[in-house]
Amino acid sequence: MNNVEHQEMILDGIGVSPGICIGKAYLVELDGLDIVEKYRIRTSLVPVEIKRFKQAVKKAKDELRAIIENTPDAVRKHADILETHVILLKDKMLYGKIIETIETEHINSEWALKKVASSLKAMFMSMSDPYLKERALDIVHVSDKILHHLVGADQVNIASIDKRVILVAPDLSPAQTSQIQLERVKGFITDQGGSASHTSIIARSLGIPAVSGLECATRSVCNDDLMIVDGISGLVIIHPSEQTLLSYEERRIQYEAQMSLLNRQSHLDAVTLDGHRFFVMGNIELPEEIVSVLDRGGDGVGLYRTEFQYLGRPDFPCEEELFEKYKDVVEVMSPRPVTIRTLDINGDKALEHPSGGVEDNPALGLRAIRYCLKHLPVFKTQLRAILRAAAYGNVRVLFPMISGFEEIQEAKNLLNTVSEELLQEGTPHNRNVEIGIMIEVPSAVILADVMADAVDFFSIGTNDLIQFSLAIDRGNRDVAYLYSPLHPAILRLLKQTVDAAHAKGKKVFMCGEMAGDPVHLPMLIGLGIQEFSMTPHAIPLAKRTIRSLNLAESCGFVSNILKEKTTKAVMERVQRHFTMSDTEISTGRA
Ligand code: PEP
Ligand code: MG
């Protein structure tokens, strides 16, 4: 390694989960490449296998082309190397030989690639010319790239990491992030992603620092490089100097001390200065997270994202398995409410079960309630498990992605059918559960007055509501700058929802990420939202913020803010208003 590689380097991204960690890098991208297996291909399927290989090469080429196009002039030299790699991808010695090997030996593409690449690498390594010797490395890089596309990033097994590391990845899927073991992974950084992606949400609920949207992290970091991840400011420092290390170590200790002070006060109720009680609940993805909700003074579970029990497995969980999990959560939280959201599958949380072709627009596709109403046995199994668990505590049922009134009718009818069946069978259950819908599709806001007739509560899902109303992919870093909960249109949608619900005497909660950022709370309580649900780590600060607010004053503040025309103007007002003493504990959200 030369000196340049050891110089301190700062990367600027989006802080998606607050906190600071210092540790060694672990490149996720390279990890899947060790798990290549050899298997035979039937003669009739050889052409299909060759097609699969060619597709992987094409993807690798497209990826390299995109990297080259986005390489700034200052590092053009790097792009020249990549140009060589593009040529090498189709080189006869590599590409041609691999196809020939699949054809003659009837073996899978991964194995053929490994075989051909190893012999080419050995050949170049044995050459005396240092230039040619170096070409061995290019072979490794190029074949790694193809292999990555053949194997698929989703097969990387994060759960098997056995050292304390910081993950560095092009992107992490929600399924991969939920495999993170806290005792091993200190934090992560990714090239892609924004703060509202599910991956970021999971990072916040795990309480590990994370920075996304770095663009070039995987190209700037090598395995075992020392680095600092600052999830508050969104900075990543690679090869930090002694001085930087010391200053960040101090900041880390200070941040953790502030957090533990907040945690100690978290069991006090969230009552405003003028005596109004608000409820601050936890969002959970996995049953184990209820401990975190209780430890941080959560008033209940405002959103249980049940889909994570369905991810990363080839089969569907059975009723008994679901019931046991829900019962555990409900019993431990009782008498506090547990809001169980029915399956919000697909979108960015895709099932592994082959359920038809790949969707072009999964976020707008057969997901959530739409999926459930098309797969009744899957839905009914879950509803039965929920009603059975409801016999053990305080359960609310929440339907996701409702875009029309008939979806509520169908879902409620099904809940009644299931309840009848349980009654006939004599299976203990509780049908007196509150029923709510997520308000996360603009049509649900437009029809909020109608929807309110059919439910007990609304829970506003700002993550999707912002995505759909502002036409911004919540996981796309290129449009992350437009993703703002403080867009005047979003504020109007919130107001419309609350007014429609209150006119019918129905409650309004918020479980999207907007609720977890204390800077928004004066406005949200002023709008009339009664309950907030967030990643458990955000609960203590949210409760303390509410304790420092005055509801009457917040209502006045909201009427002024609703007059603003631009996001910038709203943001400035909101920031100015947020003049609490603890503003230095930032949530890290962009
Ligand atoms: C939301 O959309 O705001 C929400 C809470 O649901 P999810 O993040 O699971 O899509
Ligand atoms: Mg949603």
Image (tube, helix red, strand yellow):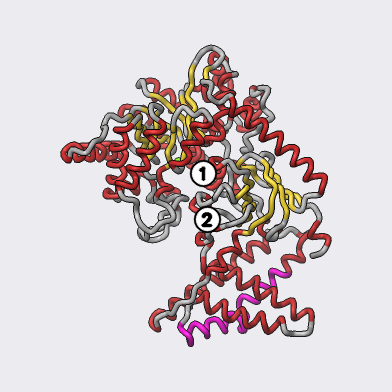
The residue range painted magenta reads 81-106
The residue type indicated by label 2 comes to Ala
- Judge whether residue 85 is colored magenta: yes
Residue with the mark numbered 2: 159
- Residue drawn at (58%, 68%), measured in percent from left and top? 60
Q: Nearer the viewer, residue 590 or 172?
A: 172
- Placement of the N terminus among the 4 image quadrants: bottom right
Inspect the image, locate mark 1, and give the three-letter code of the amino acid beneath it: Ala
Element on which disc 1 rests: loop
Q: Could you tell me if residue 163 is visible in this image? A: yes
In-image side of 325 versus 462 (left or right): left
Residue 332 locus on image (x, y percent): 41, 33
Q: In the shown orientation, is residue 162 left or right of residue 334?
A: right
Count the numbered circles shown: 2
Quarter of the picture containing the C terminus is top right
Image spot of residue 102 (x, y percent): 49, 82
- Residue 443's label in the rendered image is none
Against 539, is 60 above or below? below
